[in-house]
Amino acid sequence: MSVSPGSRCRRDRSARLEPMTSTYDTLASRLQNAFDTLEVGADPVLRTSDRSDYQANGVMALAKRLARTPRDLAEEILVRADLTGVATVEIAGPGFLNLTLTPDFLAHQLAQLRADARLGIDSVATVRTIVIDYSAPNAAKEMHVGNLRSTVIGDALARMYRFAGHHVIARNHVGDWGTPFAMLIEHLLDRNQGEDSSFSIGDLDGFYKEARTKFDADAAFKERARARVVALQAGDPETLRLWRVIVDQSIAYLDLVYQDLGVTLTVNDVVGESFYNDMLSDVVADLQAAGLIIESGGALCVFPPGFTNREGEALPLIVRKSDEGFGYAASDLAAVRDRVDNLHADEMLYVVGVPQAQHFEMVFAVARMAGWLPDGVRCEHVTFGNVLGPDRKMFKSRSGETVKLASLLDEAIERADAALKERNTDLDEMARTQLAVEIARAAIKYADLSTDRHHDYIFDLDRMIAFEGDTGPYLQYAHARLRSIFRRLGSPWEPASVAFSLDTPQERHLALGLLAFPEAFEASLASLQPHRLCVYLFDVAQRLTAFYDACPVLTSEGALRDQRLALCDLAARTLSLGLSVLGIDAPEQM
RNA sequence: GCGGCUGUAGCUCAGCGGAUAGAGCAUCGGUCUUCGGAACCGAGUGUCGGGGGUUCAAAUCCCUCCAGCCGCACCA
């Protein structure tokens, strides 16, 4: 990840070593000090405001608790709060504190921001190890829309955590075991008739469907596949060898999709179900030793309290099936242990669709009962809603099949390319195609990331790839326009210092937006909701275009020109960095 | 039946305890001899699913009802 790919301009020479204190944090801590003198820990409730730059709403609640009149209390807090040189304050309404930043403080903060490659986002003081389980397609099938959200959201969270300074371990828990693979092995043998060396699966989906069809129609094949499952789980060397061949091919295939999507996952992050195979019997044995296992209907179960079925009876987590095979509960438990014991996870995230909510609750509950999941380890199922078609039903192709991710991306690239052609840019074909890819990815990813992940969303390629509105391409364009300004300068822009006077409302509004980047990023990450950062970036883009329209940059002169160039540079860096931590490219030119 | 998620402008969505509920798209009307018009400004529409409650303050928290989606023992 590049930190500020957009900018080649030199920063202020007075580069600091200390991280800057964000505007929000500065105000918050000054107010907190004052509130603490009246009641320790009382929340000032500091927010951005449309009536002033910031507003603090905590006075009313505190007044209530202290049985005082809010306005008197507000007066007293203002006396106690050291806001000199930072902000002027007005008491409004029942007891709101409306804060307006002083010109000096604004200028100071902007200068700090200019000098900070991280744009005010501190690298964390204590690095935690975060294991993020995401994407997790079935390796036997081709990636489809059903895998999109986990992949895109998971990757954004991974990038954000990494940028924050944490140690991220991505785990792609692919389905690479069991009956589907036994089927594929048999099918492969049928097709190649024993000749080994150069297997080629080609179209993975087609290959899987052939096997599936045979499995359903051909009793003899089904029997062979069954036997093959047994051989696979028993570790038969020849079976394992063939399995390996198929898995490697499948993973290589998935890897291409990840590259096309611009996702950071690589083959090294693939730790599929098969990885846990050897640990499953220990999982059961240890649960048994802990006295947690109850046999029910031939299956070995754990009954975590609080879960009931349709009849109101206790609901089991089936750790070993009645046929003595292991289900995914066992491998998920093994994964919890592995991640805690061997990866030393401080935090584990599972980016998996909401239908599995109960399953994960039960797995986590059992892991806690068994003592495998310490209280200090944050363990969270990061859920998300479905991708729907225009009819509000699960997104399917016209023929009713699941839509392949690759073809979705191809279509988006085609649209983007066509749009670029229409605008007859002077790009050569190679550059244009590359650009179309970046735009297509941005369109798809931004559409996915920019709505609250809990909600379903409607997949509408026309809307998401549009260059106007709240879309990925629009944000890319906002960035590209800024970069073009610096290109037009013809020479590097490197002022020794910039005096920010921010005399027009648009300049000031933009500047305030840029200063709010740290809290937007932190709020987004803390809530594991990338859409908050999207909302922020779109807001910056809107402030930017208003500024851009009202404030000539290149045709202005002297200090004013430098100030405006500095705002452009900061805005470009903000968009570029913000998009990059979401996994979206910010091209220099569109 | 139990549990979970969702219901905000014509459409797609933000807002999730604070002062008149916002944006994008679409519609209509303006601006500007375009530092890239893929622009800007303005206009309008909302019982925030219904009803109760808590609170100085509720789209936001609690209860209840309605509607829709999803889970609820051996497929992951």
Image: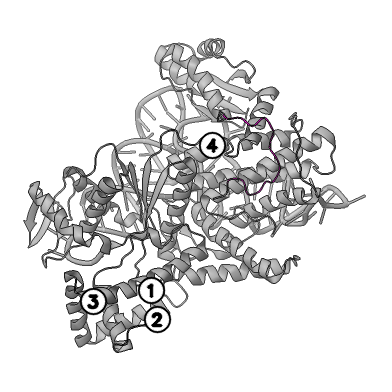
Q: Nearer the viewer, residue A256 or A481?
A: A256
Q: Which residue is mark 2?
A: A200
Q: Nearer the viewer, residue B20 or A567?
A: A567
Q: Nearer the viewer, mark 2 or mark 4?
A: 2
Q: Secondary structure at mark 1?
A: helix
Q: Which residue is mark 4?
A: A121
- Going by the numbered disc 3, the residue's amino acid type is Thr
Q: Residue at x 42, y 70 (%)?
A: A252
Relative to A282, is B3 on the left or the right?
A: right
- Going by the numbered disc 4, the residue's amino acid type is Ile
Q: Chain of mark 1?
A: A
Rendering coords of residue A397 (x, y %): 46, 73
Give the number of the disc on residue A239.
3
Q: Which residue is mark 1?
A: A249
Q: Nearer the viewer, mark 3 or mark 4?
A: 3
Q: Residue at x 59, y 65 (%)?
A: A437
